[in-house]
Image (cartoon, grey):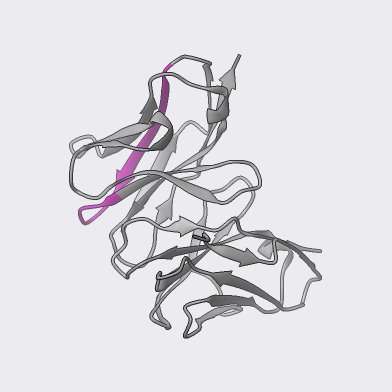
């Protein structure tokens, strides 16, 4: 079975631009979460979606938004990019809302110049 | 609220020696606890998890961790280090709701 897949793997954007990152969860997993990992730090929680509804949001500005589609795949959108948004963006999936261990994708490396 | 403190941003051990990575947690509710490993330029891989069953948890690649409520600790151990264990290790805590709170990570170096 395929794991959590993320696209693209690498991305370079200019300050002020918009970016869309994509995630396909493991088949049968209905929960998708997004994390931001800045170099040298642990991942920070951005969003969780379950059954296409937002179930949790971390301490990130409104420039960050996400959605989950009927097939449970998800998009993370970031508007008005700042240099500080440069990071590895990780998507994780799990079967249900009750958390017992996420499976993470390999991430999208975003560089803002 | 939950939080995790990992003691030591870098740990070096000789190949074949005991690996001990320290993690202390804070949680207002009974926690779920995790250890993840991250190899360079990769995502996170779950090593093991504690979900209120046995306090000694065995994971993949010979790692194990013991939940000690009285010490609010969840240290990761491996009896004999291998060169392939060199990576970044993250301890994490969750209340079982919507998010995992990660520590800052410990980079494990294996000396030949």
**Residue A79, quarter of the rendered image:** bottom right
Q: Residue B81: x percent and y percent?
A: 48, 21
User: Residue reaching furthest bottom?
Assistant: A70
The magenta segment: B18-32
From this view, report whether residue B11 is shown above or below residue A48. above
**Residue A17, quarter of the rendered image:** bottom right
Q: Residue A98: x percent and y percent?
A: 28, 66
Q: Residue at x 39, y 73 (%)?
A: A30
User: Residue reaching furthest front?
Assistant: A1
Count of numbered tags: 0
From this view, report whether residue A72 is shown above or below residue B34. below
Q: Residue at x 32, y 70 (%)?
A: A97
Q: Any magenta on residue A83?
A: no
Residue A52 at least partly seen? yes
Q: Residue at x 40, y 70 (%)?
A: A28
Residue A58 at least partly seen? no
The residue lying toward the viewer, choosing from B101 and B35, is B35
Q: Main secondary structure of the magenta part?
A: strand
Split into 4 quadrants, where in the image is the C terminus of chain B? top right
Quick check: B38 left or right of A20?
left
Split into 4 quadrants, where in the image is the N terminus of chain B? bottom left
From this view, report whether residue A70 is shown above or below residue B59. below
Q: Residue A59: x percent and y percent?
A: 48, 68
């Amino acid at each position: 079975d395929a794991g959590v897949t993320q696209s693209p793997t690498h991305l370079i954007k200019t300050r002020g631009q918009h970016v869309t990152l994509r995630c396909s969860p493991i088949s049968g997993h209905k929960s998708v979460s997004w994390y931001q990992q800045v170099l040298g730090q642990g991942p920070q929680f951005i969003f969780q979606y379950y059954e296409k509804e937002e179930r949790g949001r971390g301490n990130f500005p409104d420039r960050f938004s996400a959605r989950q589609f009927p097939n449970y795949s998800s998009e993370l959108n970031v508007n008005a990019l700042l240099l500080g948004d440069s990071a590895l963006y990780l998507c994780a999936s799990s079967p249900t809302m009750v958390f017992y261990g996420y499976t993470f994708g390999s991430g999208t490396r975003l560089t803002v110049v | 609220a939950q939080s995790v403190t990992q003691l030591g941003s870098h740990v070096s051990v000789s190949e074949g020696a005991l690996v001990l990575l320290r993690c202390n947690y804070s949680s207002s509710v009974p926690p779920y606890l995790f250890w993840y490993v991250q190899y360079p330029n990769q995502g996170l891989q779950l090593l093991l998890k504690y979900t209120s069953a046995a306090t000694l948890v065995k994971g993949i690649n010979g790692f194990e961790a013991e939940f000690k409520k009285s010490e609010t600790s969840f240290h990761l151990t491996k009896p004999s280090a291998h060169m392939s264990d060199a990576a970044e290790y993250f301890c994490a805590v969750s209340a079982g709701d919507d998010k995992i709170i990660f520590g800052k990570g410990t980079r494990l170096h294996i000396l030949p």
